[in-house]
Amino acid sequence: GAGVSQTPSNKVTEKGKYVELRCDPISGHTALYWYRQSLGQGPEFLIYFQGTGAADDSGLPNDRFFAVRPEGSVSTLKIQRTERGDSAVYLCASSSGTGGDEQYFGPGTRLTVT
Amino acid sequence: QKEVEQNSGPLSVPEGAIASLNCTYSDRGSQSFFWYRQYSGKSPELIMFIYSNGDKEDGRFTAQLNKASQYVSLLIRDSQPSDSATYLCAVDSGGYNKLIFGAGTRLAVHP
C-alpha cells in the first residue's frame, strides 16, 4: 500500500520567510510524528499527534514552529520567520497509534534557508 | 538528557561476513527498540524492532536486547554490498511514543 508522503521534496526559501511542509500519513494510522534531521545526526523529535491533537510538542525548538492536523490525517508543519539554522531535512512518520509501536517514515522535505 | 549512543564507524566488513552494530541507551524506562537503515540522501527505513529481552531474527537480521545492560545490537549475516548504509538505533522515550535516535553507524561492505 501507499506509504507516508511528504511535499515538497525540496524547499529553498529566504531568511525571514514563512514555509509550510505537508505530510500525508499511511492510511489508517492515527499517530503522526515530525522529526528534523541535520547532516550526520539522527532524527530529532519535534511533535507527535494522536488523532487531531498534539499529544507531545516538547521537541519544537521555539514558537516559530507550529504544526496542525485538523482532520486527523494530513499534517502541516509551519515555520515562521525562517532562520539559516532551520535548514535540515524534515521527516514525517506515522504509526498505528498504540504506544511504542513501529514508526514508518516518509521521504522527507529538504529545507534550505538562504 | 536521555541519550542513545552508537559508534559512528565506519564499520568495514567483507562481503559474506557478519556485521555487528551496537547501541546503548540511558533511559531505563524505555520499552521499544528499533533499527532503521538509511541510505545516503534517503529517509530512514525500519528494518527491525524488538520489545523483549533476548534475540529476534528476521531473515539475515538479528536484533538482540539486554535491558539490564541497556544494550541493543543488530547482527547482519552474509553481509552484501547493498547493506552498505547508515544504521540508526532508536529507543522510545520512557514508554512514550517519541523516539530518541542515535547518530548512526556507517556500515561499508566491500566485495
Image (tube, coloured by chain):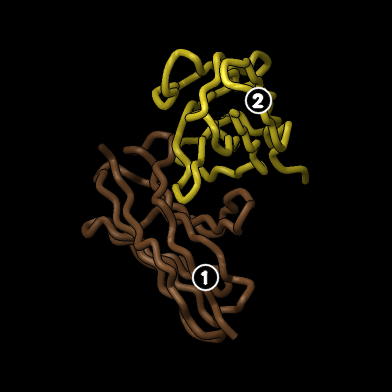
Chain colours: A yellow, B brown
- Residue located at (22% from left, 57% from top): B68
**Which quarter of the rendered picture does the C terminus of chain A lie within?**
top right
What kind of element bears circle 2? strand
* Mark 1 surroundings within 10 Å by alpha-carbon count, few (fewer than 14), some (14 through 19), many (20 or more): some
> Residue B54 sits in which quadrant?
bottom left
Which residue reaches farthest right? Answer: A1
- Give the left or right position of residue A50, taking residue A3 as reference: left
> Residue B60 sits in which quadrant?
bottom right
Image location (x, y in percent) of residue A102: 53, 45
Residue of label 1: B61
Q: What residue type is labelled 2?
A: Thr
Image location (x, y in percent) of residue A112: 61, 33
Image location (x, y in percent) of residue B44: 57, 50
From mark 1 to mark 2, how far is it between C-alphas? 41 Å
Q: What residue type is labelled 1?
A: Phe
- Residue located at (60% from left, 53% from top): B45
